[in-house]
Amino acid sequence: MAILVTGGTGYIGSHTIIELLNEGHDVVIVDNLSNSKIEVLQRIKQITSKDFKFHEVDILCKEALEEIFIENSIDAVIHFAGLKAVAESVVKPLFYYDNNITGTLVLCELMEKYNVKKMVFSSSATVYRASNSPLTEDSELGATNPYGNTKLMIEQILRDLCISNSSWGVTILRYFNPIGAHESGLVGEDSVGIPNNLMPYITQVAVGKREQLNIYGNDYNTYDGTGIRDYIHVVDLAKGHLRALNKIFDEEKVNVYNLGTGKGYSVLEVVHKFSKSTGIDIPYTFCNRRPGDVEVCYADSSKAFKELGWKSERDLEEMCKDAWRWQTLNPYGYTEK
Ligand code: NAD
Ligand code: WQD
């Protein structure tokens, strides 16, 4: 199949493209490089020894995106392109709504025009109110920030599209907390500036870029007082997209799946596992809770197993080791210092 991958040079997109190429799919990447580096393309080639197409295009630019639909015979789209920083979305809501929602509308209009009505969409566990883990796909929804709202709104747009025309097939994947990197150490998460997320922060402390980890709250109602999340290896997540692709051709409707491990770890457990797996101590200090954080969030991923035959295979130790390998081999990310 020929798959158009929006946001394909990003963290999850790049890992998914490796899996797509390894399975023999043709890949056309679209990315405006707003949060990724062009150097990743060479790394993907190095790992897969396969060729693919890349277009530096903003999905809001309809004319440029249309050219890609004209030039390529696309069978399906995996739609990763979007902005994802929660705190930034609170400060710049219009930027987030425009990029994520208008971008998706432009993409869907062209998909309809060129009769490409199959999509896998990157949603997030952030769409859940997260009051009662394990969260199933039917758990109560409700976002608390503009980023989360864009995911909820896009999910609704895609549902409405599927109602409007039965030849649309959409699989919505709600990711929990992706971490880790490709086992080669060639592809990983290239955080710009101070990382917002836990694992990139830990690896930057480990490599000496940051002094210590600030743990946001040790007064949660959990066994050690720190927040609990469902960390999932990015390669397991990437593999989930291949299973999801089969589903959109199977049935012509919208399907939603959680992609998580089903197991929650506290911040302290992650810190200790990282130290044990790598032999590096992570100095930390407790500070106030981060506004907007939930206490506990982990998935019930049994639906993905039952219907897609997918489950995560890599454990927390592997996630830590792979994240660390990526960080040590690429202390400055994809660009040389
Ligand atoms: P990322 O920032 O690494 O990748 C997103 C890519 O989209 C980037 O390469 C960026 O340059 C590109 N992009 C953004 N706006 C674009 C536009 N208008 N036109 C073209 N390209 C554009 O993020 P990621 O972690 O790989 O996330 C991929 C998707 O998964 C996002 O939609 C994100 O919201 C979602 N998601 C991520 C996580 C996570 O923790 N990483 C969790 C849940 C959901
Ligand atoms: C994990 C835990 C923090 C950093 C975010 C988005 C979510 C999704 C995934 C896109 C929490 C604690 C963190 C630090 C810490 N992204 N922490 N010190 O908040 O679960 O989810 O990424 O869809 O939408 O909100 O992930 O990695 O930021 O935090 O103590 O420096 O680590 O409080 O308990 P989160 P995270």
Image (cartoon, rainbow, N blue to C red):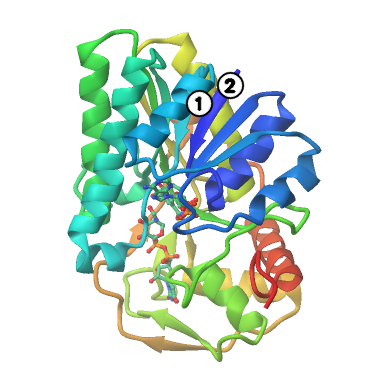
Figure quadrant of the C terminus: bottom right
Residue 163 drawn above or below residue 208: above
Question: In the rendered picture of this protein, how many numbered marks are placed on residues?
Answer: 2
Where does the N terminus fall, quadrant-wise?
A: top right
Q: Nearer the viewer, mark 2 or mark 1?
A: 2
Tell me residue 316's x, y (percent): 63, 58
Three-letter amino acid code at the position of disc 1 = Ala
273 sits left or right of 308 in the view: right
Res 94 quadrant in image: bottom left
At mark 1, the secondary structure is helix
Q: Residue at x 76, y 69 (%)?
A: 329
Give the mark, 2 or 1, whose residue is nearer the N terminus.
2
Mark 1 is surrounded, within 10 Å at the Cα level, by few (under 14), some (14 to 19) or many (20 or more) other residues, namely many
327 left or right, relative to 309: right
Query: 91 or 135: nearer the eye?
Result: 91
Q: Which mark is residue 2?
A: 2
Q: Position of residue 41 (x, y in %)?
A: 67, 48
Question: What is the three-letter code of the residue carrying label 2?
Answer: Ala
Q: CA distance from mark 2 to mark 1?
A: 15 Å
Q: Which mark is residue 244?
A: 1
Identify the residue shown where x is 48% and y is 18%. Answer: 247
